[in-house]
Image: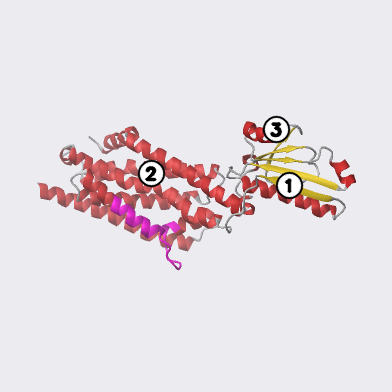
Amino acid sequence: MGVGALMKKELEEIISERLYLLAFLVQLLIALSITTVALMYSSLSSPEVMERYLPPQQVRVGVAGDASALEIENLGLVHLEPRDSYWGAMDRLGLVAVLVAPENLSVALREGRVRFTIYIDNTNPLSGFADAMLSQAVERLRQSLGGRAEVVLEVSGAAAAGAPPEYLELIYGILLPFILLLPAFLAANMTTDSIVGEKERRTYELLAVAPLSLRELMLAKTLPIAGVALAQAAVWMLILSLRGIQVHNPLLILLILALLDSLFIGAGVVISAISDTTKEANAGVTMLLIAASLLLFAPLRGELPSPVRLIALLASSEVAEPVEVLEMLVPLAVLAAGTLLVGEKMLERRESMRV
């Protein structure tokens, strides 16, 4: 069996393994859930921040009556009949809120009193954003009239004010790197399953005597895992972009993730070398992931170099500092290569002891 054939076999096993498919689905749900929670938090706490991340068509708001004097920004408007059931229209049309304006704005202005009512679904994560955008439009009209008419705004079901704005730090500093590192975490487990699984099935010895060097065998085992992990990260980046969270410097981020994938895969090889059963390997991987999570995401003070910090910096800014990128890429590449080499030597030594 050649390297190519073994790589194809490994890739087919990964794709057909139900446990891995379930893990991919769980990661997808985590990515969607985390972005939804982040949008909810930021919508309630800092709607102005969200103006840069939410396309107008994503926040649909119904408008009933004559709202032509209002400058409504960053919202997708759906025109309703004045006699519509507003709460029913929200459910039927998937609206976040409904703005009810006077049926004849010019008459209301002559009478000196203009009344607006906002009906808002405060169970919707984007309710705070819609509320802020509509309220700002009404306030601009009030200022433009300069006291010539009284402008009254009533809000029914408005979302309560939230915490101080920390959206950017939350999504880019913690949640985005965590989502993108999930495939790397899984890659370590997939590596031990692949190698230790061969030991348990008594097929590892057959591979060891195949016309392949140990390095070729490792490449055939690990390259498909690295490819799947990197493809997952690319998909998660696409999902984040579709959710309105812009990810800058995607190629540089994928390069960092490729090195992190290699590092975790190398750690998986090391664990496989000292494990005879998947139970032992799973315990080792669990300890590895706990230690890695604490090391990568612990709130350390200072400007210590960290792949998580670099991913956050690259993702949140169009400008990347080449020196800082190289300061992380070079040691990360050396560490990943060294871990893979140690794993290879440990496997070789373990098999020599068996012989």
Marks 2 and 3: in contact by CB < 8 Å?
no
Residue designated by label 3: 85
Q: Is residue 41 above or below residue 91?
A: below
Callout 3: few (<14), some (14-19), or many (20+) C-alpha neighbours within 10 Å?
A: few
Q: Name the secondary structure under disc 3.
A: loop
Q: Is residue 15 above or below residue 48?
A: above
User: Residue 110's spot in the image, x, y percent?
Assistant: 90, 45
Distance CA(mark 3)–CA(mark 1):
17 Å
**Which one is nearer the viewer's eye here, 89 or 70?**
89
Residue designated by label 2: 229
**The quadrant where residue 305 appears:** bottom left
Q: Nearer the viewer, mark 3 or mark 2?
A: 3
User: Residue 20's spot in the image, x, y percent?
Assistant: 34, 38
Distance CA(mark 3)–CA(mark 2):
49 Å
Distance CA(mark 1)–CA(mark 2):
51 Å
Q: Is residue 270 visible?
A: yes
Residue designated by label 1: 154
Q: Residue furthest bottom?
A: 302
Q: Earlier in the sequence, mark 3 or mark 2?
A: 3
Q: Name the secondary structure under disc 1.
A: strand
User: Residue 1's spot in the image, x, y percent?
Assistant: 22, 34
Q: Nearer the viewer, mark 1 or mark 2?
A: 1
What span is in magenta?
286-308
Q: On the rendered structure, is 214 left or right of 106?
A: left
Amino acid type, mark 3: Ser
**Which one is nearer the viewer's eye here, 337 or 230?**
230
**The quadrant where residue 125 appears:** top right
Callout 1: few (<14), some (14-19), or many (20+) C-alpha neighbours within 10 Å?
A: some
Name the magenta segment's main secondary structure. Answer: helix
Amino acid type, mark 2: Ala
